[in-house]
Image (cartoon, rainbow, N blue to C red):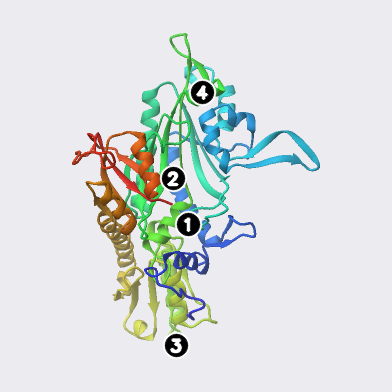
Amino acid sequence: MSKEIGITVSKKDDLSEWYTQVVTKSGLADYASVKGFMVLMPYGYSIWEKIKEFLDKRLKATGHSNAYFPLLIPESFLRKEAEHFSGFTPEVFWVTSAGNDKLGERLAVRPTSETVIYDSYAKWIRSWRDLPLLINVWNSVLRAEIKMTKPFMRTSEFLWQEGHTVHADKEDTDAEVMRILELYRQLIEEQLAIPALVGSKTDREKFVGALYTMTLESMMPDGKALQMGTSHNLGQNFSKAFEIRYLGNDEETHYAWNSSWGVSWRLIGAVIMLHGDDRGLVIPPRIAPVQVVIVPIPYKAEGVDISGRAKSLADKLQEAGISVTLDDRAQYTPGWKFNDWELKGVPVRIEIGPRDVSRQQVTIVRRDTSERSAVPEVDVIKETKRLLDAVQSSLFEKASRALKQAIHDVHTYDDLKRTIETEGGFVRACWCSETACEDRIKDETGATIRLVPMQDEQVFSECVCCGKTAKKVVYFARAY
């Protein structure tokens, strides 16, 4: 593969350029003609489909149903929840005319769907028998990102799922928030092979309009944190704004409770950035559109049917539930194909050449380590499954070691500033719980409190900012 086709920069030397080349040259996505937008190409969309299939199956198994709500939201809806409105206004795209006619009220292109969904919920819910109402939506949302854009990580339009539920009380809403948080953890850690820290946001960093926000945060190779998913208890804020009330079995009328939660295609960005190497993508097997590629090595000799062997093996792997592609393109050399599929991050490559045929074996190559092994034909399915599991585990273990190394304990404000500036990563520090200290640290370092650990950790110093008695251990970081 020529330098122009392959990756031309090192991930270590220029992460941003490396990332852009991997995204475009692997066929995941392309830049759109409108700044801040991107085209999700078939290969990238197929990864999103894997994520969607995993979540969709489990959401339906826990009683959630899918629905769809309008793209355009009246400005008056957004204004009903004042905190929510003020938080999203700077990012909103507005529709002000229909054809040549000016609209009487501006319409927001949805930055998130709480308001338009809860307007419907107010009409649907009457009694405690209607609860809980558990609805999930697969859609796209738009938030103006013009200056700083990066495919998958920060774009003006992105695909996501957003769940919106209605409950009778706080306890049931809390249970929903934690149920979804655990589902997201399973997706991120067990499918994407990315370790995450789990905890709550501070009041300053929580979702606008929420009672509280739970989050999963991961660390990228450049020392910046990435918010992977969030789950919010919205309290009764939106129910009171939109008059979502129900008649309880006590014959009294009550305001309902809401939760919302979501993950987006930025998960794909995290996979690219965390697992990829200087040859391109490295995709965890459980979300790989193609888990195995078979590359036959042509050999023109009588009685040697390499193509037939390759086709037969592909059929057997497919029957065994393994996603496989047979690359029998005659116009490309085997070496070109090896590089092409490595760029695309396919977890396992199987080569079949004349020597393999004569020995009734195949050569199997792992994408993550480049380890090659000769495997008897009779053992190929068993060994391929073993290798796919091994690659999945190895990627998670490698990322877990990197996460552990990226957490730095600090005791003083000078140490915090130095660590954020020179090392990055998560800075673990003690905090007095005062917003003034949180604001000062953000203003002076660009770092925010990414999470308060779900399980309280032992306070080990005074407040890192003001020196007063600390109440919590928190994790600071600069973030995407």
- In the picture as drawn, the residue positioned furthest to the bottom comes out as 301
Expressed as whole percent of the image width and height from the top left, the position of residue 406 reads 28, 55
Q: In the image shown, does 232 or 327 lie closer to the viewer?
A: 232
Q: Label 3 belongs to which residue?
A: 299
Q: Secondary structure at mark 1?
A: helix
The disc, 1 or 3, on the residue closer to the chain's N-terminal end is 1
Query: Of the residues tagged 1 and 3, which is closer to the observer?
Result: 1
* Gap between marks 3 and 2 measured at Cα: 45 Å
Labels 4 and 2 touching (C-beta < 8 A)? no
What is the crowding at mark 4: few (fewer than 14 residues within 10 Å), some, or many (at least 20)?
A: many
Q: Look at the numbered discs 1 and 3 and tell me whether their residues touch, using CB distance below 8 Å.
A: no
Q: Is residue 98 visible?
A: yes
Disc nearer the start of the sequence (3/2): 2
Marks 1/4: CA–CA distance: 36 Å
User: What kind of residue is marked 2?
Assistant: Leu
Q: Is residue 151 left or right of residue 400?
A: right
Q: Secondary structure at mark 3?
A: loop
Q: Residue 56: x percent and y percent?
A: 46, 44
Q: Which mark is residue 55?
A: 2
Sequence-wise first label, 1 or 2:
1
Crowd rating for badge 1 (residues with CA inside 10 Å; few <14, some 14–19, many 20+): many
Residue at 66 percent across and 41 percent down: it is 94
Q: Where does residue 443 sit, x and y in percent of width and height?
A: 40, 45
Q: Which residue is mark 1?
A: 47
Kindly check if marks 3 and 2 are in contact, taking CB atoms under 8 A apart as contact. no
Query: Is 268 above or below relative to 114?
Result: below
Q: Nearer the viewer, mark 3 or mark 2?
A: 2
